[in-house]
Amino acid sequence: MPEKNTPFMRGPRASRQLASERMSERFADGFARFASVLAMFTIPARSPANHAQPVPPRETSLGTEMHVAATPPPVASITAHWTPPTVQATEMTSDPRLLEQQYLLRSSLPEVRQEIIRALGEIKSRESVEVLSRLFQRERREELKIDILGTIGDLDDDKMLEPKLAFLFRAVTPMHARLVREVAISTLADIDDRRVIALLESLQSDGDLEIRNFAAEILRDGAR
């Protein structure tokens, strides 16, 4: 039988002590390796300034290690070079419906709308007058409404008389601003048609005193 002091007959306390010693050795060795690896990848503390400063290259056992500080451009420089999107000039077409769609775009500027109004006037068709009439009803700017009135008033083709009168009769109704109504009345005064006289006579009982006086004045001038 082997002696009690042989390695294979250690008691539980001796075995735990040996295991503890081996664990300590492995821990010490592992810690030493971890510390060496950590030292290779340690990044120096950054400057507390507002923008990170570039760190010079550092020689390590793996070669030259580069650290590049990503410094975003100042917000002021971004906003200084930013410009809002602009609306390109509308490409004119001979299709009244397409012109109407271009006119109703939220991005269409007043200058672009004026070009569309003129383009619709040059088409000289019933459809173009109908489109102008719809745009007149939806438009909120008085200057553009007056542009539409002038464009339709310049249509001297006899074939355009009926849609032209229908449009102007709606333009003199009280739902529109006084200036717009006065321009419509002046446009009607240039048309030699008995229906115009009947309309002007009815306006002498209008709720707006200025409109009544204006219609009466035109009737007097026409009777001379």
Image (tube, rainbow, N blue to C red):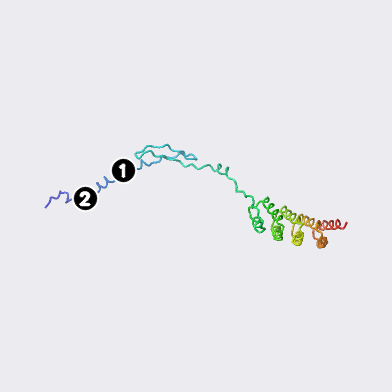
Which residue is drawn at the image coordinates 31% and 43% (left, top)? 33
SS for dot 1? helix
Q: Is residue 121 above or below residue 37?
A: below
Q: Is residue 119 visible?
A: yes
Q: Residue 211: percent from the left, percent from the top?
A: 80, 57
State which quadrant residue 121 falls in. bottom right
Comes first in the chain, label 1 or label 2: 2
Q: Quadrant of residue 93?
A: bottom right
The front one of 174 and 124 is 124
Image marks 1 and 2: residues in contact by CB distance under 8 Å: no
- Which residue is under mark 2? 15
Mark 1: amino acid: Arg
- Tell me if residue 173 can be seen: no
- List x then y, in percent, for residue 158: 77, 60
Which residue, given by chain and number where applicable, does mark 1 sit on? 33
Closest to the camera, between mark 1 and mark 2, is 1
Asked whether, in this view, residue 59 is left or right of residue 209, the answer is: left
Identify the element where label 2 is drawn: helix
Q: Amino acid at mark 2?
A: Ser
**How many numbered circles does the render carry?**
2
Percent x, y for residue 27? 29, 46
212 with respect to 119 (left or right): right
